[in-house]
Image: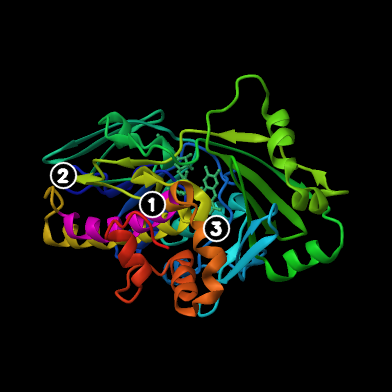
Amino acid sequence: MKPNSTQNGFDYDVVVVGGGPAGSTAATLLAQYGHTVLLLESDRHPRFHIGESMLPFSEPIIQRLGIDWSAGNQSKSGAVFIDEATAQRMYFPLSIHRKTYQIERGPFDQLLFENATKHGVQTHQQEKVLDVSCQPDGVDIVSDKGQYRCRYLVDATGRSALTGRKGKAIKRIENLGKFAVYSHFENIQPGDEADELFRTGNIYVPVVDIGWIWIIPLAGRRLSVGLVVQKERPKDCDAEELLRRYLLASPLLHRLLDGAEQYAPVRIEADFSYTNQSRYGSRYACCGDAAGFLDPVFSSGVFLAFTSAARVADRVHQGLVQGREADPELHTEDDEAYLLGFNTMRLFVERFYQSNIVHNLFFEADRDPDLKAQIAQLLAGDLWVDNNTLQQRLLAGRRTVN
Ligand SMILES: Cc1cc2nc3c(=O)[nH]c(=O)nc-3n(C[C@H](O)[C@H](O)[C@H](O)COP(=O)(O)OP(=O)(O)OC[C@H]3O[C@@H](n4cnc5c(N)ncnc54)[C@H](O)[C@@H]3O)c2cc1C
């Protein structure tokens, strides 16, 4: 349904494509500024999505959205990196000044989407955008249910990356994780290790020779577990077999899952890290995974989705007010800020795979409290600062940071 009145031939000020965390955030903030916004989502909420471990520095955006992200979710203290072969472990506290949670994405993304409706966004589900065309005088959008014309387009289509793939601007980042295999378990039995996990809400990240494992405690004594593998998916085994062959090789996971029940299918996701070389242009901007995607070892995805969406929304508002929406340079300054965050995480992830940062730096961090605090600062998402020398060294492109 279109709004009753159209202005200058536009149905809406902004159309946001994709109703995940990035799209719902951008749409809500733009509606808060008073713009008319249409949010189109091809799926129907609650839909399954992987990516449950949140970072505390998302909290300021959560507050702007006016939602309660604690409801029904497991609070998270920090991150524990583990090498089971050597029994080394390192805990980084993350929720010192700001709180964060391990969340189930189905209900959480639904909450964000419904929050957009509450703020006056026109929301359509099960409507897939097929094509967009950004012209100097407006944007035309064609979906499987209709056509719209608007002043500005926000592409928040996640890893489908609608405009990036259309413009052949998606560039793969090589040599990080290549695919993930994961599932969910419930009825986790009592025991010291399991009780500690659910008391702290920590994410456990055991590192293994072929990649890394995530163990994420969810509300209701459930676990999300998965493995990101740094080699091509073997052709000779199905998803269940992959899970058994790789993931259950972790003794820690074996103990935690003893007596538990698998309640979700084993899923596989490939098509890993990339950048979008055309993140913005005349009358459009991308946010969240549509702007770029990183191997999730440091749980940065939803945090980058929130922060990039908020930045895009604030700038689009300014552009619309000033009549600068066709200016292809509208987002240039913000893109530098986006890249500071994205590249910090990217370099951190690359060090994880290429220079074994967990063994060489994380496990040694107790010897240097400043360094430990700097690592925790990065892992918490506190990226737009000028006092983190580890971040500065990463960005300065030093080959090793230990
Ligand atoms: C294995 C794995 C583990 C991860 N773990 C974590 C983690 O622990 N913590 C974390 O923060 N992140 C994690 N992530 C990343 C996280 O899932 C994403 O970064 C996050 O979902 C990005 O949000 P988004 O809104 O940009 O995209 P999405 O959440 O993917 O939302 C995009 C939406 O757009 C819709 N859409 C797509 N195309 C169209 C179209 N043409 N028309 C209409 N709608 C469309 C889709 O249906 C979808 O709902 C993980 C990712 C993977 C693959």
Front disc: 1 or 3: 3
What segment carries the magenta color? 330-350
Number of residues whose C-alpha sits closer than 10 Å to that of mark 2, classed few (under 14), some (14–19) or many (20 or more)? many
Which residue matches tag 1?
346
Q: Is residue 345 magenta?
A: yes
Which mark is in front, 2 or 3?
3
Give the image quarter of residue 322.
Answer: bottom left
On the picture, is 376 further left or further right than 204?
left
Q: Is residue 121 visible?
A: no
Mark nearer the N terminus (1 vs 2): 2
Location of mark 2 (residue): 282
For mark 1, does the 10 Å Cα neighbourhood hold few (<14), some (14 to 19), or many (20 or more) residues? many
The numbered mark at residue 359 is 3
Secondary element at image label 2:
loop
Rendered position, 60 above or below 279: below
The answer to if 116 sits in the magenta stretch is: no
Q: Which residue is found at the position 67% from the left and 64% from the top?
A: 72
- Secondary structure of the residue carrying tag 1 is helix
* Residues under numbered marks 1 and 2 in contact, where contact means CB atoms less than 8 Å apart: no
Q: Between residues 183 and 79, which one lies in front from this camera angle?
A: 79
Percent coordinates x, y for residue 382 in the rendering: 41, 70
The quarter of the image holding the N terminus is top left
Mark 2 vs ligand 1: CB below 8 Å:
no
Cα distance in 3D space between marks 1 and 2: 27 Å
| Residue drawn at x 39%, y 37% as measured from the top left | 174
Q: Secondary structure at mark 3?
A: helix
Q: Quadrant of residue 229?
A: top right
